[in-house]
Amino acid sequence: MIASINPVDNTLITSFEPATPTAIEAALVRAAAAFARHRETPLAERAAKLARAAEILETESDRYGRLLTLEMGKPIAAARAEVAKCALACRYYAEHGAALLADEIIPTSARRSLVRYQPLGVVLAVMPWNFPFWQVFRFAAPSLMAGNTGILKHASNVPQSALAIEEILRRAGFDGDEFQTLLITSSQVESLLVDDRIAAATLTGSEGAGRSVGSIAGREIKKVVLELGGSDPFVIMPSADIDTAAQVAAKARCVNNGQSCIAAKRFIVHRDVAGEFTTKFVAAMRALRVGDPMDESTDVGPLATPQILEEVAAFVDDATALGAKALCGGRRVDGPGNYYPPTVLVDIPSAAKIVTEEVFGPVAALFVAKNKEDAVRIANATPFGLGAAAWTRDEEEQRFFADRIEAGQVFINAMVASDPRVPFGGIRRSGFGRELGPHGIREFVNAKTIWVA
Ligand code: NAP
């Protein structure tokens, strides 16, 4: 079902019928024709449209933020901040896109040799509900700037956000065919992916969705970027500022009600500071206010769907049944809505699912390390490789963690966050390809070598 359902009480707000094959065909025809036009537009014109999109996002962050909170339950302040962050991505590519796409002269024996970056065509974006605006804009801004057109298949629980994004880009000056939202189910994705008019695809979401889209794209020999799950480590060493680390740890675990791919999920603390960090971390987790996400003072709102609530509760129940202890939280909040409280688990046996799988909710798994080598061993003992944070004031240790942790990004003395200026992505089962920064705009382009003898 494609429907907005308020996670505060699971009431239906509105629902939509999936697009018919005829509507999908019409969208493909329009997207392909729009590509032929859009690729010829001057870069300055594309940049001006992105700058206008940024203005709309900034001035109307409250209106659009409310929509995100209503559809998926993130606290309203975070929702407004997400909308405003999309403006940063639009501005970054509006300002730097032309330089990033400029011809790259490479001296050779030729009279002239260079690389020219040209757009690929219509790119299909399959996107998740957890950051309904940010996930889409971080793909759309560089891709439109590079001259591609886009078709968005958003998650089935955020259809109004999906339509709002199309509306914003249209108001910014992209004609309605350069970026289209198609309200379709995941079972309709394959028919689009195999269509010759789709040149490439990007998917942000779970491993299962990634495997499916990645394998179809492989069969069709189409470029694909996969941004998948993570189980990010957060390492705390004795030289760290423990007070700050504990505060940031709670925020890093509970960001977006715990439903972020780059939320810190496994906390690995050196045994010399394990007692102090654990006490302060548990206090910080307990202090977070759980409640109505429209309330400005709420830190943690409901999980997006009843199914996610079931999954999170099952992870905790599995760990505690095997002997883990919950130092706070540990059982769902009574009453309506998909609420689960911030939870810290310790003494977790290695057989518990939480050790190796991703938990998409405010549940922290805490481990104690003997030394820095042991901390890295635990950090890397995961099939994922998205982000990682290490807290230490020792410069040699900072270099050690930055070098040794296997992840797409390592943050020292800070929580992992995406930023339009730097590339973002994962390795191993967290996916491949990069978004944002200079690398992001070069994913969906043909790096064409031109050799003039
Ligand atoms: P999901 O269930 O995989 O859904 C993501 C998108 O893929 C939705 O649009 C969904 O459509 C679609 N989809 C699902 N199965 C599909 C299939 N077999 N074929 C084609 N499309 C399919 O993931 P989610 O629960 O929304 O998002 C949570 C996951 O995303 C977590 O694992 C999280 O870590 C990951 N994530 C990663 C990043 C990153 O940058 N690495 C960022 C955010 C989230 P329907 O809604 O219609 O099923």
Image: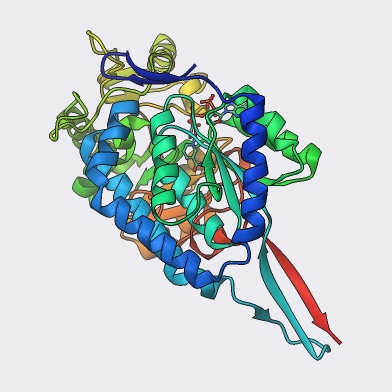
Left or right: residue 364 versus residue 275 is: right
Please provide percent x and percent y for residue 121: 67, 53
Relative to 421, is 234 above or below? above
Q: Quadrant of the C terminus?
A: bottom right
Please provide percent x and percent y for residue 377: 52, 42
Left or right: residue 148 versus residue 222 is: left
Left or right: residue 208 versus residue 396 is: right
The residue lying toward the viewer, choosing from 181 and 255, is: 181
Q: Image point 25% across, 47% down: which residue?
A: 60
- Name, please, the residue furthest toward the right: 453
Where is residue 397, by image quadrant?
bottom left
- Across the whole image, how many numbered discs are drawn on residues? 0
The residue lying toward the viewer, choosing from 392 and 117, is: 117
Please provide percent x and percent y for residue 192: 68, 34
Instruction: Name the colour scheme.
Output: rainbow
Relative to 81, is 443 above or below? below
**Res 260 visible:** no
Q: Image point 28% across, 31% down: which residue?
A: 69
**Res 279 visible:** yes
Please provide percent x and percent y for residue 376: 49, 46
